[in-house]
Image (cartoon, rainbow, N blue to C red):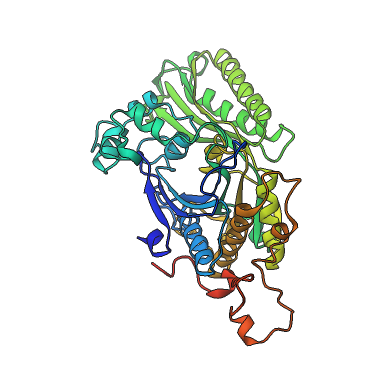
Amino acid sequence: MLMQKNGLTVREDAMGTIFGRLEGTETVKKRGTKRGNVVGSGSHTDAIPLSGKYDGVYGVLGAVEALGALKRAKFQPRRHLEAVMFNSEEPSRFGMACSGSRAMGGVLDAEKLQTLPDVLNTSKSFFDAATQAGYGSEWRGENGSRARTAKEMVEKCSLMPMDSHYYSFVELHIEQGPELEHEKLDIGVVTAIAAPAAMEITFEGDGGHAGAQLMHLRNDAVVAGSKLAVAVEKFAKQSGSRDTVATVGGFTVKPNAINSVPRSAVLEIDVRDIDLKRRDHVVQQIKNAAKEIASEQNVRVDVRIINKDDPATSGDSAMNAVELAVTHLGHSMKRMVSRAYHDTLFVAKACSNVGMIFIPCYKGYSHRPDEFSTEEQMRKGVETLALTMAKLSRESSSIDDVDEEHAKLPFFVPDRDDGEGEGERSGERGSDHPRDPSMEERRGPNDEL
């Protein structure tokens, strides 16, 4: 296993999330503090159909490589360091995104989870599928603990209360957008993660024959749905912020026949923002518009909220650590928003000091087969993550009381114009200056596979 090859101690939770740990010297939390003593990083390896191979996977392999590099450099963390592979980030099989990280954040409803259908039709429920894979009721935790029901499975995965496990969590990911590539920047320092509200709005008319039913007698469901689709775009554009986005991603018509007046139109709508109040205002505008349009078009309407999640804000300590690492490595960067969904959104429910590191991807393409980042781009992201985790593992718990030695990272980043000989450049330093893992082996995170 890749985590074990890199010298990490591996464990799994009851839902199948995998953790690889590099042990720190702080084996127990400091007396008088409730803060966790683990710095984590990771992502997911599951994917949607016809997707690429970088979304999520890069964040898992990058975290493992970062910790492996730290270990090879003989870096000794104070807090434990963890690489994480989350279970079920994509909604492809059970229709719910981020089930593993939702459980960790204490916001996964076990009863709702059990009602979700398995599109593979190989199990009766998520708990059944987990058990078939060796988790669920087959899982054995520390001290022989078990999960006999879906409720127990979800509870065993929780990292609550807030900040009790992670001191910080920083996810490495491709941007999934074009900004970094367009601006020729190496690293994006994520300040906030947008969260969606998912809606399903159904208009019902009476239908009829396309030739026999006169225009003034019709109550066409597609006309109503089309008017709402136009309104959705207008509301997002009028929000006052470029961070508000709204999408009609599904539009299903019945009976969907050329010679029949549509009697049903179902719209699936996604509204996202980093500001909860602003996003929910757009959601309310859409609901109000749906009712007004239904009245105007003499159709019936049903509005259903499928899901609403809260946005997350990055922690100052996490962002500062990323920016410090980027500066020492000489890379270029900008602060930016993540408009896509990530596991960190739900880890933020259990850790107040989260962050994300973005690297560019080709034309911003993602969730498609030509998704791509270069080896150089991936290397810069991994070495940034390694330095970030090193700093977070040693810093003071208070951002205002960070030891200068740890803040400036002289223990980790070599002075590249110090005039030392070849032996120093190849990593033959004294014990106080371990080799920089970013310079040790210029390779991508996939090379060990």
Q: Is residue 142 above or below residue 61?
A: above
Decide if residue 120 is in sight here. no
How many numbered discs?
0
Taking depth in this image into account, of 57 and 243 the one nearest to the observer is: 57
Q: Is residue 45 above or below residue 383?
A: above
Give the residue displayed 30% in from the left and 28% down from the top. Answer: 149
Q: Is residue 241 above or below residue 2?
A: above
Give the residue displayed 66% in from the left and 33% down from the top. Answer: 236
Quarter of the image with the N terminus in it: bottom left
Give the residue displayed 70% in from the left and 51% down from the top. Answer: 320
- Please state the horizontal and vertical placement of residue 377, each as a whole percent of the image: 58, 66
Quarter of the image with the C terminus in it: bottom left
Instruction: Please state if 158 lies on the left or on the right of 234 as rendered.
Output: left
Give the residue displayed 42% in from the left and 37% down from the top. Answer: 99
Taking depth in this image into account, of 175 and 158 the one nearest to the observer is: 158
Taking depth in this image into account, of 445 and 174 the one nearest to the observer is: 445
- Please state the horizontal and vertical placement of residue 60, each as a whole percent of the image: 46, 55
- Please state the horizontal and vertical placement of residue 279, each as a whole percent of the image: 64, 30
Of all residues shown, which one is farthest toward the front? 31
Instruction: Please state if 152 lies on the left or on the right of 190 as rendered.
Output: left
Decide if residue 307 is in sight here. yes
Of all residues shown, which one is farthest toward the bottom? 422
- Please state the horizontal and vertical placement of residue 394, each as a whole percent of the image: 63, 54
Location of residue 421 by image quarter: bottom right
